[in-house]
Structures are given as structure tokens and as C-alpha cells.
Image (cartoon, grey):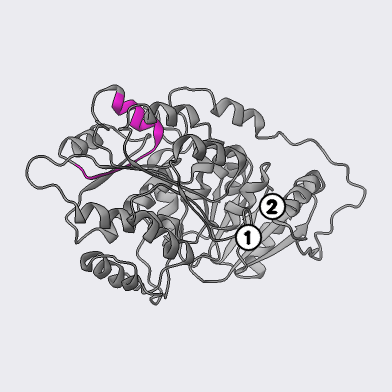
């Protein structure tokens, strides 16, 4: 199937073509016609399969075909995302594929000054991309009205629930018009997502293009057993001996991310960290330099995982296994995107053996293991307890200023739109 078969208008098709795309991904092929019909939709697909375009393209089509004439523009579409990185990515897609439609959009999130965002909203918009905290902040100041919303999108809804945004979402839902189209996109169909869908969606179309919590077959997964105090030397060894040029590394904590960057720099490996405690400018700089190939390693925590969208990223390393098994799927989904191949390596110490078993149970496969010579783990090592994310998770569910992804003081950081691809055009795309 081609994009020309999906009922999209010439201006949108022209924008898609200019980006070098001709064929939709499976989630796009199924979701675009469903959204165009005007009904509610519950859609799930693996990370990196193109969910963003699965809703932005038909939304642009629907708005451009029913554009209001005369008077100030009214806000008709609200897209909610859990993190600044993801909000910026969605806004980039709206701008890129809507550039010939005449529609106007903006993105709002915490961690930056609100005045430019307020001015953009006041000038008149068709589409608003927002994180929940900043949206509620501006709503409380009467800077944004949701009275004319026709389409609501909850993007990465599973992550929003995991980050404790349910209460914020309910506050936003309470002021939206009763008659509207609701689109809920998620990487997984968890019990919590199904419960949210039951209360939000009206006889929705259901789309699931891959088994829940399955991993992309284009990603080669490998476990390296190692002692906990040898993880950093092993990572440096892998990067240097394999001549890896672009590596996304996940740590369990912000402190761990900062510490690892310092250690890698001492090994003459360029690295920067991206996490919730970093300033907006620092996060933007780190992500931009990583995309441009100016640094070899970007160290991230799970808070930023869903918003890092880099074409043909070759390597992802789990320096620490995630405490939440589903996060493993989201992490490694940063590679193997848009039909390209990728490698996901996990450095696993004795403390994480149960986490590894939980992950393998979730993804329904036994992951291959390889011990690297010189880094053999001590067979007599005793596991030590790991501070689970549950404590942080419970804290994140408490409403407070600066909650991740919004609020006056920032929370989850943002990123500038992804750099233009220099690779040859592909047949399908992942955004």
C-alpha cells in the first residue's frame, strides 16, 4: 500500500513525498483510515513503528478539509504527551507534514518560559501539543481555552499513567467538550490502559499491530554478564574495541547517569547526560550534539526514553536493567527503527538476575548471553538490594509543581526537533 491509497490530500502527500516516504508502516496503514472516519480509536504498536504519523497525518487531513473561514482561529485539536522530548517530536511531525495545509500549531511544556507559549496561543491555533503540567498551568491562568476541541490525542498513554499523570488527565478531560473524537495511542495494552480506554473512548476501533510487549525482530539483543564494579570498564571496552560511534546508554538513576559520563570522559569517550534534573538548554544541547555525531555516548534515564527519536541509531546499551520490565521494550526500541537494524546490549550483574528473568518472561524469549574475556563475573558474588523505582514512582503520583513533563518549574525536559536525515529516502517511516 502507498500513502496515495489512504485518502490524504495533495498538500499532505506532497509534504510526505518531500521527506522521501511512499509507503505507510502497518500502524499507519490501519490507523489513518480509522481516524479519518471520525470515530474513537485505541491503538498499540511497538516503539518506533510510526504511531506519531499514524495520528498526525489523518488529523491534518480532517482539519484542512473542514477549515474554518473568517475570524480568529479556534483551537480544535489537543495532543497530550508525557515528556518534553516527545512533545517536541510530535510538534515537528505536525509542522513537517502540515506545512502546505495552512494550519497553525505550537507546543507547550515546562522548563522554559511560558510567555512565548502564551503569545503563540493568543495568536490563534488549530493544534496544540502539550504536556499535562504546563497545560494545566496555563489553563489556571486563563491563557488557553479547550472549549472548541474536536479531537483529543493521548500519545504514549501508558507512559503517562506510569508517570502519574492520571489525575492531571482527568482534570483536562473535565473541561473538554463532550462531543469529540478521542485517540489513545500506546506502546502496550496494559490493564491500566484498558481501564482508561473504557472510561474515555466510545465504541473505539481497536488496532494492535504487534503482540503486546514484544520486541522488534530487527534488534539483535545480547546480555553480557559482568560484576557490578566492572560495568563501566566493560562499556568503555565495548565502545573502543568495536569502534562504536553512536551509543545510547540507559542508567537507573540521574546520579548514575552523571557519574557514568564523568567516567567515560576520563576514558577519552565523549559523553553527555540527559535526564529530568538537567536544564532545558543542557538537554537540548546534549540531544542535538548526539544526533549530529559530535559526542559518542548519550546517557539517559527512562524519563527521556520515549522522546529520543534518532533515525538509524545503531546501538542501545542497558548499563542498568530497568526496574519496570516494560521499560526494557521501550529502551531498546530506540534502535531498529524504520526498517533499519540495531543492537541492544545489556550489562547484567548478579543484583539484576531477577530483573532479567522478569524481562524474559515479559517478552517471551530467552536472551542470548556472552561473557567478555577479561570481564568474567565472580561466580561467588552475592546479590545486593537495588533501590527500586517504586519509591520514586509513588512520589511522581503526588501532585506537585514541576511534575515531569510540565508545571512552572519544569519536570521532564524538552528537546529541539530532530535533525533532518542525511540517509537515503526509505519506503516507510517511523514517526
Q: Which of 104 and 200 is in front in this view?
A: 200
Residue 127 within the magenta-colored segment of the rendering: yes
Q: Nearer the viewer, residue 387 or 199?
A: 199
**Marked residue nearer the N-terminal end (1 or 2):** 1
Q: In which quarter of the image is the N terminus?
A: bottom left
Residue range (magenta) = 125-139
Q: Residues within 10 Å of mark 2 (few under 14, many from 20)?
A: some
Q: Is residue 8 visible?
A: yes
Q: Is residue 148 above or below residue 356?
A: above
Residue 95, image quadrant: bottom left
Mark 2 lies on residue: 232
Residue found 60% across the figure and 44% down from its top: 190
Q: Is residue 14 above or below residue 358?
A: below
Q: Can residue 275 be seen in this view?
A: no
67 displayed left or right of 157: left
Q: Residues within 10 Å of mark 1 (few under 14, many from 20)?
A: many
Question: Could you tell me which secondary element the residue under label 1 belongs to?
Answer: loop
Q: Position of residue 253 (x, y in %)?
A: 61, 39
Residue found 15% across the figure and 42% down from its top: 73
Q: Position of residue 243 (x, y in %)?
A: 60, 70
Residue found 43% across the figure and 31% down from its top: 169
Question: Could you tell me which secondary element the residue under label 2 belongs to?
Answer: helix
**Which residue sits furthest right?**
380
Q: Distance between the residues labelled 1 and 2?
A: 26 Å
Residue 312 within the magenta-colored segment of the rendering: no
Mark 1 lies on residue: 215
Residue 146, image quadrant: top left
Q: Position of residue 404 (x, y in %)?
A: 47, 34
The number of callouts visible is: 2
Amino acid at each position: 500500500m502507498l500513502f496515495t491509497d489512504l485518502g490524504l490530500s495533495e498538500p499532505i502527500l506532497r509534504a510526505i513525498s518531500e521527506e522521501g516516504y511512499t509507503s505507510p508502516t502497518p500502524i499507519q496503514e490501519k490507523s489513518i483510515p480509522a481516524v479519518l472516519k471520525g470515530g474513537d480509536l485505541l491503538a498499540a504498536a511497538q516503539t518506533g513503528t510510526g504511531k506519531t504519523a499514524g495520528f498526525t497525518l489523518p488529523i491534518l487531513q480532517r482539519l484542512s478539509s473542514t477549515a474554518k473561514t473568517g475570524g480568529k482561529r479556534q483551537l480544535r485539536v489537543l495532543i497530550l504527551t508525557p515528556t518534553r522530548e516527545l512533545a517536541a517530536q510530535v510538534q515537528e511531525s505536525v509542522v513537517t507534514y502540515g506545512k502546505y495545509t495552512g494550519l497553525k500549531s505550537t507546543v507547550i511544556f515546562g522548563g522554559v518560559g511560558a510567555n512565548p507559549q502564551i503569545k503563540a496561543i493568543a495568536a490563534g491555533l488549530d493544534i496544540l501539543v502539550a504536556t499535562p503540567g504546563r497545560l494545566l498551568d496555563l489553563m489556571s491562568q486563563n491563557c488557553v481555552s479547550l472549549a472548541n476541541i474536536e479531537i483529543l490525542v493521548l500519545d504514549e498513554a501508558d507512559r503517562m499513567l506510569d508517570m502519574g499523570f492520571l489525575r492531571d488527565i482527568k482534570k483536562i478531560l473535565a473541561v473538554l467538550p463532550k462531543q469529540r473524537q478521542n485517540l489513545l495511542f500506546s506502546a502496550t495494552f496494559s490493564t491500566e490502559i484498558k481501564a482508561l480506554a473504557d472510561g474515555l473512548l466510545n465504541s473505539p476501533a481497536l488496532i494492535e499491530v504487534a503482540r503486546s510487549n514484544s520486541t522488534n525482530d530487527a534488534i539483535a539483543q545480547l546480555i553480557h554478564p559482568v560484576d557490578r564494579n566492572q560495568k563501566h570498564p566493560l562499556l568503555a571496552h565495548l565502545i573502543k574495541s568495536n569502534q562504536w560511534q553512536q551509543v545510547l546508554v540507559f542508567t537507573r538513576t540521574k546520579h548514575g547517569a552523571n557519574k557514568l559520563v564523568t567516567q567515560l570522559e576520563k576514558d577519552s569517550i565523549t559523553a553527555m547526560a540527559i535526564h529530568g534534573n538537567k536544564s532545558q538548554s543542557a538537554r537540548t544541547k546534549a540531544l542535538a550534539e548526539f544526533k549530529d555525531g559530535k559526542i559518542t555516548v548519550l546517557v539517559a534515564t527512562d524519563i527521556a526514553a520515549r522522546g529520543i527519536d534518532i533515525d538509524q541509531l545503531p546501538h542501545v546499551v542497558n548499563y542498568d536493567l530497568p526496574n519496570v520490565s516494560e521499560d526494557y521494550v521501550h529502551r531498546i526500541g530506540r534502535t531498529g527503527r524504520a526498517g533499519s537494524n540495531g543492537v541492544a546490549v545489556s550489562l547484567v550483574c548478579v543484583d539484576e538476575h531477577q530483573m532479567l528473568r522478569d524481562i524474559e518472561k515479559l517478552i517471551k524469549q530467552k536472551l542470548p548471553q556472552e561473557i567478555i574475556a577479561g570481564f568474567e563475573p565472580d561466580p561467588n558474588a552475592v546479590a545486593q538490594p537495588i533501590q527500586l523505582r517504586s519509591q520514586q514512582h509513588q512520589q511522581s503520583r503526588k501532585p506537585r509543581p514541576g511534575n515531569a513533563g510540565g508545571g512552572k518549574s519544569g519536570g521532564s525536559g524538552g528537546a529541539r526537533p530532530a535533525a533532518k536525515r542525511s540517509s537515503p529516502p526509505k519506503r516507510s517511516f517511523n514517526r
